[in-house]
Image: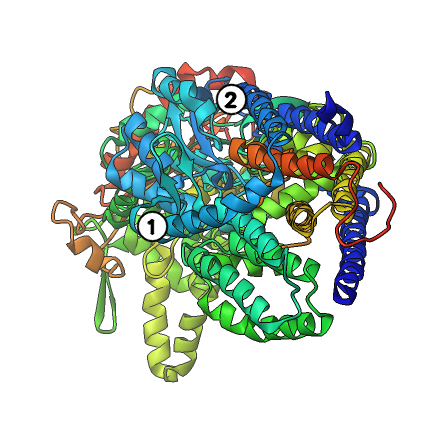
Amino acid sequence: MKVLRQLDWLLLASLLGLAAIGLITLYAAVHQGDIGLWQRQVIFWLIGLAVFAGLCFIPLRVLGLVCWPVYVLALLMLLLVPFVGDVQMGARRWLNLGIVHLQPSELMKWALMFVLANWFATREANQTAHLFTALILAVLPAGLIILQPDLGTTMVLLFAATAMVIAAGLPWRWFGYAVAAALAAAPLLWHFMHAYQKQRVMTFLDPQSDPLGAGYHVIQSTIAIGSGGLFGKGFLQGTQARLHFLPEQHTDFIFSVLAEEGGFIAVGLLLFLYGTLITRIIMIAGRAHSRFASLICIGVASIFMLYITVNIGMVSGLLPVVGVPLPFISYGGSALVTMLAAMGLVMRVAIESQGRIAWQRPGSALV
Amino acid sequence: MHTQLDSRRRFDIRILFFYSMMVILLGVLATHILHLQWVEHQKLAQQADRNRINIVPLLPVRGEIIDSKGRPLAMNRIAYQVMMIPERVENIDHSLQQLSGALKWRPAKLTHVRERVRRSRPDRPVLLDDKLKWDQVAPIAARLHHQGGIDVQVGTYRYYPYAETMSHLIGYLSLARSYDVQAGYLSTEFIGRTGIEHSFESTLHGQLGAQQEEVDAHGRRISVLERTAPEMGKQLQLTINAKIQQAAAKALGKRTGAVVVMDVQSGAVIALLSKPGYNTNRFITGLETKQWQAWLNDPRKPLLNRATQAAYPPASTFKLVSGLAGLRQRAALATGTTTCEGAVELADRKLRCWKRKGHKKLGMHRALVESCDVYFYELGDQLGMASISDEAERWGLGQKTGIALSPESRGTIPTHQPNMMEAIRQAGAHKRMKWFRGETMITAIGQGTLTVTPLQMARLATAVANGGRVLKPKLIVGAETRVLHQVDVQEDDLQRIRDAMFDVVNTPHGTAYWPMRGLPWKAAGKTGTAQVIAMSQDDDEQKAAPEYDRHKDHAWFMGYAPFEQPKIAFAVFVEHGGHGGSAAAPVAAAVIRAAVAEGLGESSLQIASGGKKP
């Protein structure tokens, strides 16, 4: 089969390596409690891989066509959330669609990225008009999401948009202005933050200030990571995990289970696999046959890198607590399937680019 | 075309940028994690252990207290306790509500417990309820694995078989208070507060043990890692004889008063009773404020240990001290006689004898036997205040006996009272003489400002019986006998007093003849009847209780038995009891009968030092 020959095997291998680490770690995290979670995650992997495989067969231009309607749909759903959304943990984020609970902000993250990729596929980001359109496209959903309130997703959204704009050729000077403007706006942002968000930032700055409250999670996960040492306490032997000192140890805090039981050996392996995966995605971006395809790969890589950094940074006390899953490791069906779908798109770019010249690169060798 | 190439080149640079960003971010993460897992590893591993290892103190069992015959006076009974470690409980209020329902607490108890939890250290166990039976705690124990931080433990609680009779002597325990916790006790430990439980706290308490447990984040015990057993407190055997104490209590009945019985040779305290008592068993579960207030406000003052903490005028029992002073000073009247016409005139005052028609002509012997006041007014007048006070001090009055029960009253000897000396100094010379004479004369019959504790009087009786050895009262079997002071008294002089005391009990003229007839032991003693009218310090409180006959005299009887080979000495005090002969002496008779029944005469060495006359 032609597709099999054209597959990027290194990408697939690192993906499967992550699947193995993810399922082993999840088993350690849930083996005392609800083992059904682990079984469900195996099924999510199968579903996700099926989506991944399916997307390998769908031409990229289809995505170019559907991304605009999807963006508009996601925007409409975000508008609906304040009126008909479910309230969970104090924030109105979910839409009940009968079969599934959908988080429109989650969909918007990807839709915005595709729309920006499509917008800049034929445009350079060094023209004010183009940039202004991109700004509108990003700020509309960001404004709606921050009102939910969901600071974490808003920042992911804005970060992904920024990454896209930089990839699309934003002059560095302008980037510098934007950063300066953001820093200037920070006090204003602080003013509009909810108490729990302020609390999180404060706790991040000094976790010991509230050791039994908000700082508890970070203190305990840091203890778990550090106590794992270089070689770990052994599979299923982590006392922090086993005795339930870790909060959310099968979702957002799963990294500390891995670090406690597997030590730096497991952490190193995980980071190596992430590194390989993202390196592959960036390489695919570099030799893609169209600018649209390249930008999509850069977007996917950025979102991944952001998730990894924010999650590991959070559980190890480097960054404030923001609810972001660790890609491929954290329990959770929709996140996993979405990420595998994104991988499927990247794989499709790799397949389509096989034997073709990279965009606007006259005379360059076939890669 | 140019712009297109430009665009491609720019994009290639951007790709390099993203790649570098990835390398930097992954590098930062790897470095940070490596720092935690390598550099900080030891510190964080210790924290992980501290997280999971909980050191639970194991309370020692308190030493038991037994009497001289091995009867338990304070023992431990098995019961279940419910404890809570507040910081490990997710919703304290909710848990307390649940427990309150399961244990059927009254609302006041729930409030009390809630307050207790609020004020306790969150990382230490707090006692919620104890003295529980298994069927009470079984439902809680069954649910325990759902309720982290709550624990049911088998424990013991203190039980006093003679709670009312021995309340002042044995004392009671209560839970450690905040200052005890600061001193190193756990808030779940019981500490002796009064009596023997307080004085011998360190002996009885025992050593804490500890158990290292692995716990999960909710404080639930997963396994026991290490255990050091607690060390039980030492058993304490008292010189007290429970049967004799009970006999004394029964003889006193509902009256208020005190009885002290001591071993004549060793100073061992055989009985030390104060009435009314209070139920010390009620302290164990944490006494409710209401009951405590009731005891505090009771006009009969049940919390006061009348045997050691309260001092009263000794009345006529003091005449033997005045007599001894007279013999020591070779006062004319000590060997001579006087005539009692029922009163003595002193300037504008008239000092009466209790016998209005008078005793007529009499010497010291008959004055003691029939307790003539006039004789002793005159003897006191001849002796002067200093001689009387010095003699009283020689025999151990006006000073603490040093018994291991605190606090102890020292009583009052007039010249040792700073206020009085000041008053004397300030009064004019002539007035001073007149006033001071009268004061001296009534001191000689044991009235006035002179006060003594029943324990001091029992020790005085001991010293009279054993030849002048003033002993430190001891409570513990095996404790050393300590002679605090040997009175340099002539044996003949002492014998004259003893003979008089013998006749008080054994001749029909004696003030204690009738109640003391027919005892298995011949006893010697002296009665006393203290006038209360002159006393006014307690008036206000006593008015509150109409049934409390505050105008009746205090009754005293002190002495020793058997006369030939003295074994026990005793002092009986009955507050507002009336006459010493009729109110106090029968209690002594009951004590002697109990002592004989308990075989007190048979066992010890027969050291004769008090007997001569049959």
Q: Which residue is mark 1?
A: A80
Does B92 sit above or below residue A183? above
User: Circle 2 — which element?
Assistant: loop
Which residue is painted at 74% across and 39% down in the image? Answer: A353
Q: Amino acid at mark 1?
A: Leu
Tell me if A265 is positioned left or right of B374 in this view.
right
Residue A46, visible in the rendered structure:
yes
Q: Residue furthest bottom?
A: B428
What's under tag 2, amino acid-wise? Ser
Where is B508 relative to B323, above or below? above
Depicted A304 relative to depicted A331: above or below: below
Q: CA distance from mark 1 to mark 2?
A: 88 Å
Residue A312 is marked as: none
Residue B32 on image: x %, y %: 78, 50
In this orientation, which residue lies closer to the viewer: A22 or B103?
Answer: A22
Q: Is residue B549 left or right of residue A309?
A: left
| Local SS, label 1 | helix
Residues B54 and B195: in front is B54
Residue A131 placement (x, y as % from top left): 58, 67
Instruction: Tell me the quarter of the image containing the N terminus of chain B.
Output: bottom right
Measured as percent of width and height from the top left, residue B363 is found at 36, 48
Q: Quadrant of residue A281?
A: top right
Q: Nearer the viewer, residue A76 or B248?
A: A76
- Say which of marks 1 and 2 sits in front: 1
Q: Which residue is mark 2?
A: B68
